[in-house]
Amino acid sequence: MTHKRQPLFVPRSLLLALAFVAGSAPAHAADKDGAYWSQRPDECRNFVRLHAATDRKPETEAVRNWISGYLSAYNRLTPETYDITGATDFEQVLRAVERYCKNNPFADVSAAMETVTTDLYPTRHQTRRQAGR
């Protein structure tokens, strides 16, 4: 006796959900020109002023937290990236942002982060094991 395999039944709602998730990949996270709006549009000259201050103001913590979130989102959304910072620590990232901002005072902090992450990419940790965690 030969058993005939029944085709797998997949509800349309599941197919629709899968199509939606597949279409929301990070590669489609900007407009057709590659532009996107950042929730941290502060100018670099403001970052330099805050970063140089000896006292920690709420604005200083806000921008540091935004940078931390940017790095976490980058790690989550970039293929083959466990930790974009690699062997670089957070204070070194802040110094890299500061260098960019000193050279580009009218750019915004998100532009600085794009440059910093591009510079860090070749030395990123691609796996948890590589990061020693």
Image (tube, helix red, strand yellow):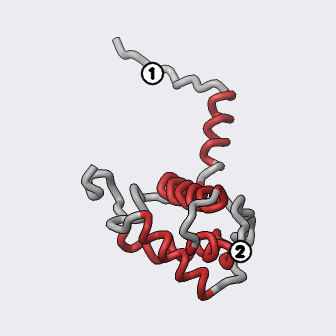
Q: Is residue 5 something that shows in the picture? A: yes
Q: Amino acid at mark 2?
A: Glu
Asked if 47 appears above or below 37 in the picture, the reply is: below
Does dot 2 land on a helix, a strand or a loop? loop
Closer to viewer: mark 2 or mark 1: 2
Q: Which mark is residue 89?
A: none
Residue reaching furthest to the front = 55
Residue reaching furthest to the bottom = 103
Residue 92 image point, x, y percent: 42, 71
Residue 80 image point, x, y percent: 41, 59
Residue 76 placement, left or right of 20: left
Does dot 1 land on a helix, a strand or a loop? loop
Q: Which of 96/82 is in front? A: 96
In the picture, residue 60 is in which quadrant?
Answer: bottom right
Q: Which of 16/86 is in front? A: 86
Residue 76 placement, left or right of 37: left
| Residues packed near mark 1 inside 10 Å, few (<14), some (14 to 19) or many (20 plus) | few
Q: Amino acid at mark 1?
A: Arg
Which residue shows up at 52% across the image and 25% down it? 8
The residue that disc 2 covers is 43
Residue reaching furthest to the top = 1
Return the disc, 2 or 1, that comes first in the chain's sequence.
1
Residue 75 placement, left or right of 87: right
Which residue shows up at 43% across the image and 72% down it? 120
Which residue shows up at 33% across the image and 55% down it? 127
Asked if 118 appears above or below 14 in the picture, the reply is: below
The residue that disc 1 covers is 5
Asked if 34 appears above or below 12 in the picture, the reply is: below
Between the C-alphas of marks 2 and 1, the distance is 63 Å
